[in-house]
């Protein structure tokens, strides 16, 4: 068992080295120094407190999305619609804010309701993908992708239509709400400790759900073998729907935090691709909840650190996406090589 | 609207659908053989950027198209290797490649942003182009659009009217049976995935060197077409002709969105641009719903006459994926 774990680690280290090797070659091909690029990414993410706080700002939604996806992956679903579920979370949160801002309720109550609203919004959007899958026979990948596009369209419609700023509507989003209605920030930084608490609570919840409950066990049974689970009397389609709802609620929480703690309004690119990135993290950690925290932090650091690249080195910041993608690809390939190799020996 | 504007508009629909046609046919071939190439969205962006860069640097448009096909074939090779040889999840590998290739396109394309480059010119066919109505509609396009017309026909012919095409259907439906009849299932899967990938790779340059000439990075507006092509492949029921119809329908709806814009001023233009997506979900639902269990149960409970009508309608719309889609095959 321990030998197995070590072997696993060795393969992942090889994958990591190969990924950095390939990305270095890509950098050399555009006449850029790899070491300088990595140094800038590191300095841009962990170099100073202010930048590390930005990493945490990106880490919160990424961790929430990853936690949610661990649930859908456990039940054997490829919830690619998670991106749209983040967006709907943000929309629902903004909607609750708009309803309650003038209500005279204390800000704490409004913030809480807004975030809960976001979770409901994400869950509803996930339920749509689930209904399409369970009752319509539409594969969750295709239903989810379509719903992602609809979610984006809905955001833009709201920003340019019913929720437009007085005067002229613009891509800068809806009217920001007053600061006292946002999640309180750490002094001088853009990260809210409450956002971190929500994210960590999300991943701890999922960890215990999957590892320590009968529900989690049944969910995994459905994921491992749908037919066998059905024959054993597990209500399979209900479990599929539950996992969609849980994932949608966590993704909705990610969208809610984006509104309540980061942007204080709805903007067109409110999700910034965290849903898709969460899918990558979930694949990289091989669906083990414990690893979600360090890997999501690493991915967030890459995203924030690479913002420096266009400024200092005139390189596109999409380098972080290339590095993340190549890394996941090599980990998948290494797992395949290992399985094939292992079977023969 | 005058008749002339409508004809020009419809001709534009045929031309603007041509990039999607290649992607849909490529994906159809790949999935017919049993391999889902989910990398399509990234492949299209990378081949659009790569094709443009090669055509720009060599000043040769044909080399640009070939470069796009090569990129598509190489990405498909990774999908094939990971899923056929290593037996990893096709969906996982394809999805990772979709994101990675997209970001790679943005990263490597940084230097080509907004650079004016070569563009495929219209090549009206003499005589045929002068036929009223049909001429401007079908025979005044660029070469890549003509090739897209021919590709639809050839792909249909290959799949449904030739012996190797019959074998292709076999390796996607019943690989074990095809194997017993002498087909090298995994080799054929490699071949069709790579050929399909090359066709998907033609989509990128068909955008960046023709219908949407140039490379504009994240604002090229090409991000998303791969996912659309994927939906259209299913809508098309893995049939190139029906798939092409889906691509034309999509392009038509987008054109309609543009045309209707002055009338529907209160609807933001960005919303009309994505109007086809809800319709796409709806059609996917209609195509798939016949496969759902509860529908079968409801049908069985219906009186004879109603059941006949409903099952006929459902069967006409229904499309079932190749039975062995996504399932690895081991000869022994």
Image (tube, coloured by chain):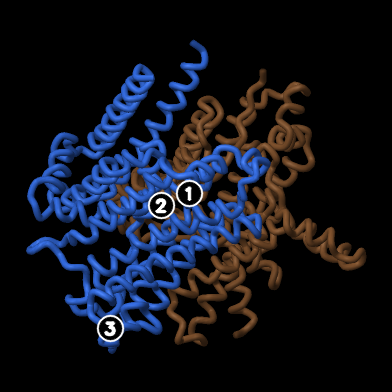
* Of residues B312 and B128, the one drawn nearer to the viewer in this rendering: B312
Q: Is residue A108 visible?
A: yes
- A41 vs B245: above or below: above
Image location (x, y in percent) of residue B262:
49, 85
Viewer-nearest residue: B128 or B188:
B188
For residue B276, above or below residue A299: below
> Residue most toward the top?
A345
Left or right: where B231 falls relative to A282 = right
- Mark 3 vs 2, N-terminal side: 2
Tell me which corner region of the image, top left, top right, bottom left or bottom right, holds residue A104.
Answer: bottom left
x then y, percent, for residue B35: 59, 37
Quick one: quadrant of the N terminus of chain B? bottom right
Quadrant assignment for the C terminus of chain B: top right
Q: Which mark is residue A72?
A: 1
Q: Are marks 3 and 1 on the same chain?
A: yes
Q: Are marks 3 and 1 in contact (CB under 8 Å)?
A: no
Marks 3/1: CA–CA distance: 35 Å
Please report whichever mark, 3 or 1, sits nearer to the chain's N-terminal start: 1
Q: Helix or strand or loop: what does disc 1 sit on? A: helix
**Res B285 → quadrant:** bottom right
| Chain colored blue | A
Q: Are marks 2 and 1 in contact (CB under 8 Å)?
A: yes
The chain displayed brown equals B
Q: From this viewpoint, which residue is outermost toward the right?
A: B304
Q: Residue at x 24, y 39 (%)?
A: A30
> Circle 3 is placed at which residue position?
A101
The residue labelled by disc 2 is A68
Same-subunit check for callouts 3 and 2 = yes
């Amino acid at each position: 068992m321990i030998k197995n774990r070590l072997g696993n680690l060795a393969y992942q280290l090889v994958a990591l080295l190969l990924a950095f090797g390939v990305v270095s070659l890509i950098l050399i091909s555009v006449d850029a120094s790899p070491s300088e690029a990595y140094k800038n990414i590191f300095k841009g993410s962990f170099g100073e407190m202010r930048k590390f706080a930005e990493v945490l700002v990106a880490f919160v939604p990424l961790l929430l999305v990853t936690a949610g996806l661990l649930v859908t992956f456990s039940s054997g679903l490829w919830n690619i619609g998670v991106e749209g579920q983040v967006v709907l979370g943000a929309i629902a949160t903004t909607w609750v804010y708009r309803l309650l801002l003038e209500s005279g309720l204390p800000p704490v109550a409004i913030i809480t309701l807004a975030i809960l609203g976001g979770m409901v919004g994400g869950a509803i959007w996930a339920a749509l993908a689930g209904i399409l899958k369970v009752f319509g026979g539409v594969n969750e990948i295709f239903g989810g992708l379509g719903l992602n596009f609809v979610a984006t369209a809905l955001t833009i419609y709201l920003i340019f239509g019913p929720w437009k700023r007085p005067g002229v509507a613009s891509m800068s989003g809806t009217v920001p709400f007053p600061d006292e209605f946002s999640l309180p920030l750490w002094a001088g930084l853009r990260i809210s400790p409450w956002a971190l608490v929500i994210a960590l609570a999300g991943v701890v919840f999922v960890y215990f759900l999957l590892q320590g409950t009968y529900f989690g066990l049944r969910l995994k049974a459905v994921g491992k073998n749908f037919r066998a689970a059905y024959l054993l009397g597990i209500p399979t389609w209900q479990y599929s729907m539950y996992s969609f709802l849980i994932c949608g609620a966590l993704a909705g929480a990610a969208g809610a935090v984006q509104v309540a703690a980061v942007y204080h309004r709805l903007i067109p690119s409110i999700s910034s691709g965290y849903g898709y990135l969460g899918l990558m993290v979930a694949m990289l950690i091989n669906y083990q909840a414990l690893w979600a925290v360090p890997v999501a932090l690493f991915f967030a650091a890459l995203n924030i650190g690479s913002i420096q690249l266009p400024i200092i080195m005139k390189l596109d910041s999409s380098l972080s996406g290339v590095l993340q993608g190549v890394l996941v690809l090599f980990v998948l390939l290494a797992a395949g090589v290992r399985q094939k190799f292992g079977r023969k020996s | 609207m005058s008749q002339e504007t409508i004809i020009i508009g419809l001709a534009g629909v045929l031309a603007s659908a041509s990039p999607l046609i290649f992607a849909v046919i490529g994906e159809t071939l790949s999935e017919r053989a049993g391999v889902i190439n989910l990398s399509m969205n990234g492949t299209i962006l990378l081949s659009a950027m790569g094709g443009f860069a090669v055509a720009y640097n060599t000043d040769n448009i044909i080399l640009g198209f070939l470069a796009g096909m090569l990129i598509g074939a190489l990405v498909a090779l990774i999908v094939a290797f990971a899923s056929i040889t290593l037996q990893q999840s096709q969906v996982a590998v394809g999805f990772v490649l979709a994101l990675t290739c997209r970001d790679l396109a943005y990263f490597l394309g940084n230097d080509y942003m907004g650079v004016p480059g070569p563009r495929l010119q219209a090549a009206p066919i003499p005589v045929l182009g002068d036929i009223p109505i049909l001429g401007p509609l079908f025979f005044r396009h660029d070469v890549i659009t003509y090739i897209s017309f021919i590709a639809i026909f050839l792909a249909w012919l290959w799949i449904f009217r030739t012996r190797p095409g019959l074998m292709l259907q076999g390796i996607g439906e019943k690989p074990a049976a095809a194997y017993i009849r002498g087909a090298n299932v995994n080799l054929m899967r490699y071949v069709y995935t790579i050929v399909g990938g090359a066709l998907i790779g033609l989509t990128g340059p068909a955008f960046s060197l023709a219908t949407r000439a140039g490379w504009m990075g994240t604002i090229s507006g090409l991000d998303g077409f791969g996912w659309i092509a994927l939906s259209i492949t299913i809508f098309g029921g893995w049939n190139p002709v029906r798939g092409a119809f889906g691509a034309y329908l999509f392009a038509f709806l987008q054109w309609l969105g543009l045309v209707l814009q002055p009338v529907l001023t209160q609807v933001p233009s960005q919303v009309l641009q994505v109007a086809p997506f809800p319709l796409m979900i709806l059609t996917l639902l209609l195509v798939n719903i016949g496969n759902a269990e509860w529908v079968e149960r409801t049908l069985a409970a219906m009186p004879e006459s109603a059941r006949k009508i409903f099952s006929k309608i459902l069967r006409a719309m229904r499309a079932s994926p190749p039975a062995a889609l996504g399932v690895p095959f081991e000869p022994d």
